[in-house]
């Protein structure tokens, strides 16, 4: 049974007296332990799709279709069911590393607070918080630091630790490398992929950077103008893209150059 099933999802956002069709007839599935990368330019609908999986669409959103996560109908389920789903079944790493962190609480306090809130005794929460910091490759002393005392990459690792606190089955990562330098970006993606493998997580990673996600396994969904225009095994689509938008993205990769662009297959052509 799939962990995630999205069927003909449509999301309209009311803004400025008009409606924007942010996601249009999106359908996809993800098996337990599976991996999906969603790529697209800014405004393509990829972050909106991710928020729908969490049941966190804003009040000005109108939706149709179905979103099933671990058997729960996210679009129809009561808030009580969705609250039980979040953190324990599905958790999220947000774009801006500072936003999920409380600036006046230490990293250790924030980790322990989440764990205690979800029923872990205080003593066990302290041990689990230290385990989480080690898991995301942060020094033990990080538990005593405030967010402003950390670099952007360290803050993002702390946010990943928060997302993993309650051992979710599914991790959603929405542009997890935003505003980080290229070396740190690669380190964060490598960390997420390593944790996905070691913990047996299912992973949905959203990015506008095809160069970062092409190292992944699993499936690829390419979004353009609110629609999924390509969807299938990542390795196959990278070798033989069918849609012009994906061919353009591949041709723009810095290590392709002119020779690489000549090798990008047109629909029905050879690679």
Image: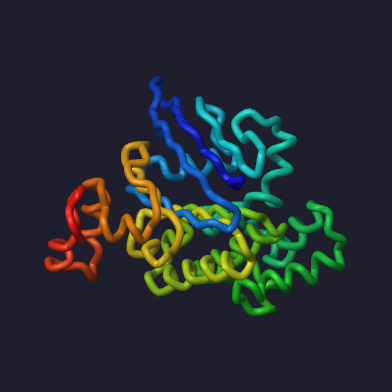
| Image: 252 above or below 4 | below
What quarter of the picture does the C terminus occupy?
Answer: bottom left
Q: In the rendered view, does 96 fall on the left or right side of 43?
A: right
Q: Does the rendering let one see residue 95?
A: no
> Closest to the observer: 148 or 240?
240
Q: Which residue is drawn at 53% across and 66% down?
A: 192
Q: Which of 24 and 55 is in front in this view?
A: 24
Residue in view at x 72 percent, y 73 percent: 131
Of residues 167 and 161, the one drawn nearer to the viewer in this rendering: 167
Tell me residue 7's x, y (percent).
Answer: 50, 34
Position of the N terminus, as image quadrant, is: top right
- The residue shown at (42%, 27%) is 15
Determine if residue 94 is in view. Answer: yes
Q: In this view, does 48 lie above or below 89?
A: above
Q: Position of residue 72 (x, y in %)?
A: 66, 37
184 left or right of 77? left
Instruction: Pinpoint residue 96: horizontal percent, then vertical percent.
Output: 50, 55
Residue 23: x percent and y percent?
42, 34
Q: Which of 19 and 74 is in front in this view?
A: 74
**Residue name at image x 58 percent, y 58 percent:** 33
Residue 162 lies in what quarter of the image? bottom right
């Amino acid at each position: 049974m799939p962990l995630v099933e999205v069927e003909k999802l449509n999301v309209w956002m009311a803004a400025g007296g008009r409606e924007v069709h942010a996601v249009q007839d999106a359908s996809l599935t993800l098996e337990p332990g599976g991996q999906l990368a969603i790529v697209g330019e800014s405004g393509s609908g990829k972050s909106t799709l991710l928020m729908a999986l969490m049941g966190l669409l804003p009040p000005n959103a109108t939706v149709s279709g179905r979103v099933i996560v671990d058997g729960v109908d996210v679009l129809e389920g009561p808030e009580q069911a969705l609250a039980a789903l979040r953190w324990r079944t599905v958790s999220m790493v947000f774009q801006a590393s500072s936003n999920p962190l409380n600036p006046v609480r230490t990293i250790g306090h924030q980790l322990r607070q989440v764990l205690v809130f979800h029923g872990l005794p205080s003593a066990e929460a302290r041990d689990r918080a230290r385990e989480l910091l080690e898991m995301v490759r942060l020094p033990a002393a990080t538990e005593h630091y405030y967010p402003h005392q950390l670099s952007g990459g360290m803050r993002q690792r702390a946010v990943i630790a928060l997302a993993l606190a309650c051992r979710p089955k599914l991790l959603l990562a929405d542009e997890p490398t935003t505003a980080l330098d290229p070396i740190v970006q690669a380190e964060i993606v490598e960390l997420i992929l390593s944790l996905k493998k070691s913990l047996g997580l299912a992973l949905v990673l959203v990015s506008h950077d095809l160069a970062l996600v092409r190292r992944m396994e699993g499936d690829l969904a390419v979004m353009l103008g609110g629609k999924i225009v390509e969807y299938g095994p990542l390795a196959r689509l990278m070798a033989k893209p069918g849609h012009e938008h994906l061919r353009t993205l591949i041709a723009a990769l810095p290590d392709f150059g002119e020779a690489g662009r000549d090798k990008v297959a047109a629909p029905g052509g050879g690679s």
